[in-house]
Amino acid sequence: MGETRESAAKILAYSPGRYPILVVELSPGELRTFYYETGYDPERTKPVSEDWLRENALGRHSFVEVSPPREIQLPALKDHVRRELLEEP
């Protein structure tokens, strides 16, 4: 996954709360969860499917869908969460 470290990704959904989990599309069809606890490290993600996103994250666990998806550089995920989701300076 080293080549994606500096590339753009799309945030598709996030879990609300103090420690947001992000569902990010790295390339078409490649969805991964990024975790607050890991500092949104691309090397410490878990692959998920579109079905998991719809049925589990959005359907059962109250994730918030980002529509349209937010395109962002991977190294900026942590700052994005801090500013936009946690509303910290």
Image (cartoon, rainbow, N blue to C red):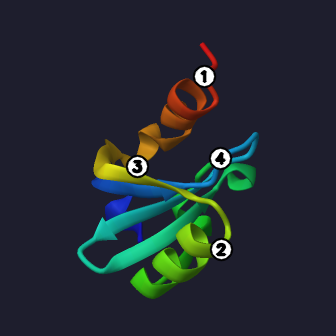
In space, the residues marked 2 and 1 are separated at their CA atoms by 25 Å
Among the two numbered marks 4 and 1 on one chain, the one whose residue lies closer to the N terminus: 4
- Residue receiving disc 2: 60
Q: Secondary structure at mark 2?
A: helix
Q: Which residue is mark 1?
A: 87
In the picture, measured across the screen, residue 28 lies left or right of residue 19, that is left
Q: CA distance from mark 4 to mark 1?
A: 12 Å
Q: Residue at x 51, y 29 (%)?
A: 84
Three-letter residue code for mark 4 = Pro
| Residue behind mark 4 | 16
Tell which tag, 4 or 3, sits nearer the viewer.
4
Where does the C terminus fall, quadrant-wise? top right
Q: Is residue 6 visible?
A: no
Q: Is the residue under label 3 in contact with that under label 4 (CB below 8 Å)?
A: no
Could you tell me if the residues under marks 2 and 1 are in contact, i.e. CB atoms within 8 Å? no
| Camera-nearest residue between 42 and 16 | 16
Question: Is residue 25 visible in the rendered structure shown here?
Answer: yes
What's the residue at 64%, 19% (across, down)?
88
